Image: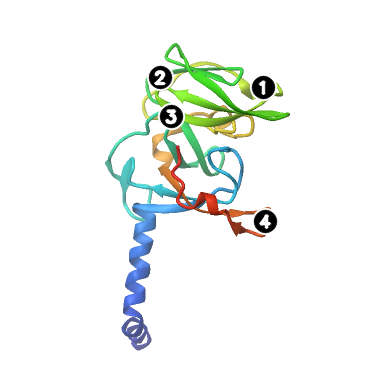
Amino acid sequence: MKLLNKIWKNNRSLIVFICLMSVFRSAIADWYEVPTGSMQPTIVEGDRIFTNKMAYDLKVPFTKIPLIKISQPNRGDIIVFDSKVANKRLIKRVVGIPGDTVEFKNNFLTINGQYLTYNKIEDALFRSDMNEDLLGIKHKIRISKQPSHVQSFDAITIPDGYYLALGDNRDNSADSRAIGLVPHNELLGKATRVIVSLDYDDYYFPRKDRYLTKLL
């Protein structure tokens, strides 16, 4: 007991700071490392992503118990969630919200009977980068020129409490096509910007052009 009292007395400010920072990261905001390219070209490997953990729910710190539901994700939101099916943390883009009917044919989306608008912005040998207009939310996607079984799925209507989420790198993403719809209770928050990005192919040096980049 005397030792604990001494530690507290000598390190009070540090202990309080650590406790407050832990609560902050648990319930208010946090940052996550992106290890894969499933959200390219929007997010690249090595990005550290700032996530607003109060965007959708206020939770009891250090738990997933919701205190107050603040909102639900909108189409175009980039969400961070703990997938029970995949057994890991994922980051994807919401393309379907409750009540939407979504169809996917040859890498092109139809939402509630409306075909989305696509504009090619880059050409490469095996892939294309395009602008996708997600019913008013414009962002970039990457598609492969090689056909695959993940480029289409039949129309599905999203039930209450669930979201259809896809990676922007449409042919290289384990998303709702593999793990199913994302339940609201798995959400950790909304990814809003890149804090810093480390280039794995350049000795982990920071990428200067990605500091505090807003995610669109």
Q: Which mark is residue 100?
A: 2
Q: Which mark is residue 163?
A: 3
Camera-nearest label, 2 or 4: 4
Residue closer to the observer: 159 or 144:
144
Image marks 4 and 1: residues in contact by CB distance under 8 Å: no
Q: What is the crowding at mark 1: few (fewer than 14 residues within 10 Å), some, or many (at least 20)?
A: few
Residue closer to the observer: 30 or 135:
135
Q: Amino acid at mark 1?
A: His
| Residue occupied by mark 4 | 202
Residue 194 percent location from the top left of the image: 48, 49
Residue 7 to residue 100: above or below:
below
Q: Which mark is residue 200?
A: none
Q: Earlier in the sequence, mark 2 or mark 1?
A: 2
Residue at screen point 54% across, 22% down:
119
SS at badge 2:
loop
| Residue occupied by mark 1 | 149
Q: Earlier in the sequence, mark 2 or mark 4?
A: 2
